[in-house]
Amino acid sequence: MVSHIDVYVVGGFHTLCLFCPPALNHGEKTMPLKVKIDWNTCIADGVCYAICPQVFEAGPDGKSQIVEQYRDGSETEGNVPDDLADCVEQARTACPTGAITVEKA
């Protein structure tokens, strides 16, 4: 008999688990991250989109921008599901100019 099934966050939603508290079921949205790129600081070295292509991509001038799926009105701001937090944090930390900021939305 299975005593517990782990809950995984997939695409920002919890998967159904019959053994977990009801709050984890019903496809609850997890807390997104607000990610911003300062184009005045970005030097287009590409480290962020090399590390985290799920969130960052090269714009026409080579400077980083948020992938269209996660944009929030502009190429430099987005709301990213927290299951990508490690990826985003690695990119933020690796940015040589500190052009990426991340906070809970």
Image: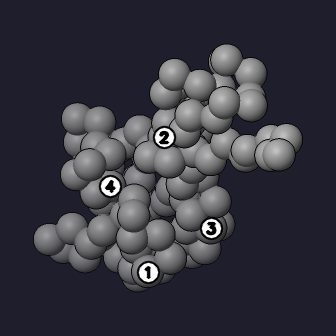
In the rendered image, which residue does mark 1 sit on?
50
In the rendered image, which residue does mark 2 sit on?
12
In the rendered image, which residue does mark 3 sit on?
90
Q: Which amino acid type is marked by label 4?
A: Ile
- Residue extending farthest to the front is 1
Q: Which amino acid type is marked by label 1?
A: Ala
Q: Are marks 4 and 3 in contact (CB under 8 Å)?
A: no
Badge 2 or badge 3: first in the primary sequence: 2
Classify mark 3: helix, strand or loop. Answer: helix
Q: Are marks 2 and 3 in contact (CB under 8 Å)?
A: no
Mark pair 3, 1: CA separation: 11 Å
Mark pair 2, 1: CA separation: 22 Å
Classify mark 4: helix, strand or loop. Answer: strand
Q: Which mark is residue 66?
A: 4
Classify mark 1: helix, strand or loop. Answer: helix
Q: Give the residue at x 49% y 59%.
A: 99
The answer to whether residue 65 shows anywhere in this view is: yes
Camera-nearest label, 4 or 2:
2
- Give whichever of 97, 28 is nearer the camera: 28
